[in-house]
Amino acid sequence: MAEATVRDILITSGLEVKADQNIFEVETDKAMMEVTTPCDGIIANVVAVTGTTYAVGSQLAFIEATEEEAIRAGLIKPGEAGANPKNQAPASAAVENLHFAIASSDVIDYSEPLSVQPTVRTGLPVPVRSSVYLSPRMRHRMDELGLNSADLSGLPGSGAGGRVTVEDFEKFISELDQRRVTDASPMRIAVADSMRRSWTRPLAAVTVPIALDKMLSHRKQLETKPGVTLYAMRALALAIAENTAVTGRLIGTKIVHPNEIAIGFAVEVADGVMVPVMRHVDRTSLAELAGTYEDLVRRALARRLPADASGGGIATVTNVGPFGITAASPIPLPEQNLVLGLMAGRKVPTWNETTQQFEPVMESNFTLSFDHRILDGGAAGRLLQRIGQLLQEPEKL
């Protein structure tokens, strides 16, 4: 995290506050979070402005505190009390508090609110074609504007072999000034960066149709009514537990196995997706997971995931069935090897060998996208088949 945007100011000058009291709500690229007071005291002045983006380490407000409180909070050392007048930036070699330490050369003038420009300032659309070569001069110019090669992937080059020249780039930027552009949200930028990093690996996908009738029948008998996604997460975790190498990370010539089987699930939020993570899914029954799952869905929709549910997953389940999607190839997160996609369920005629006739079956295509360096099609197919087998005995989940 390098910066955050102030969304709500919960204090005013003269307000008495306690240590760890919420005083600001800020938005990062993936979540809403709170800024708290480092100690007891009285708010002397608020310099932050709602809707403004600040770098980590920026001053947001000033608090008048006793020497005892300041020492207890680690803001000053004994004997250093009264060093700085109100509303003046510290002049010591280093500025320290509970959250950060910065050199005096980096001390910011707080007389005016600090506004930090987003990394991608133009809101450029991402074209579809890849450039083959970018010169050092070209890369330097892109770095100046906070762009990457994916932003120029659809730009035809006029140089030798289709190379994109600086002149091509400047013309492209100039033409964009004549177009309607909007700022991409921090979450959209984060999702785009994540997918760009994921695509540096050789990804592949396989699909297997899986019957859902037994699972849906079992669900009707339960009071909590867990969703299809939770059933799939539990089945995926049990299948992975039988061979953890399928979710290993290839580092050099070694496959690094996971320490625990933590599975994430995708939740659509405004202008993006959040992925809460559930821990030890292989060792926790479906009934025990249900309450945690519902709570994490609510927290994800509010973009307030707890720290222990953010990151660290080894695979993700995404259910696109509610959108009517019957075929898709989801992309694994950069730090993961697998993503299991659940497609829309449909009644299909299926041949019954016992009755020697076609019968209607509720079926869904399950798609497994994976890092092809770790898995091949056969291993991925067997993993999907095992998930399907486990879902045929939902009472054991």
Image (tube, rainbow, N blue to C red):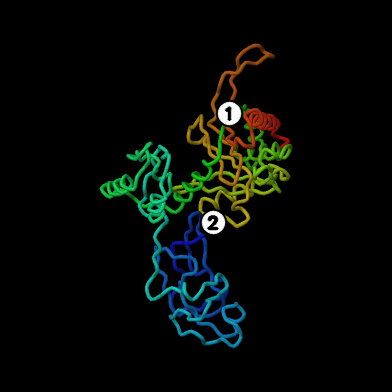
Task: Name which of mark 2 and mark 1 comes first in the sequence.
Answer: 1
**Nearer the observer, disc 2 or disc 1?**
1
Q: Is residue 361 above or below residue 163?
A: above
Q: Position of residue 81 (x, y in %)?
A: 55, 87
Q: Position of residue 57 (x, y in %)?
A: 49, 69
Residue topped by disc 2: 304
Q: Quadrant of the C terminus?
A: top right
List the single residue furthest toward the front.
160
Q: Position of residue 367 (x, y in %)?
A: 57, 32
Q: Is residue 286 above or below residue 299?
A: above
Q: In the displayed structure, does residue 292 sit left or right of residue 95?
A: right
Q: Is residue 236 above or below residue 345?
A: below
Q: Residue at x 40, y 68 (%)?
A: 114
The number of numbered badges drawn on the structure is 2
Instruction: Check disc 1 and give the amino acid type.
Output: Thr
Q: Position of residue 63 (x, y in %)?
A: 49, 79
Asked which secondary structure carries label 2, the reply is loop
Q: In the displayed structure, does residue 287 sit left or right of residue 93?
A: right
Is residue 287 in sight in this rendering? no
| Nearer to me, 31 or 314 | 314
Q: Is residue 295 above or below residue 128?
A: below
Mark 2 is surrounded, within 10 Å at the Cα level, by few (under 14), some (14 to 19) or many (20 or more) other residues, namely some
Residue topped by disc 1: 207
Q: Residue at x 35, y 52 (%)?
A: 122
Instruction: Check disc 2 and give the amino acid type.
Output: Arg
Asked which secondary structure carries label 1, the reply is strand
Mark 2–mark 1 distance (CA, rounded to whole Å): 33 Å
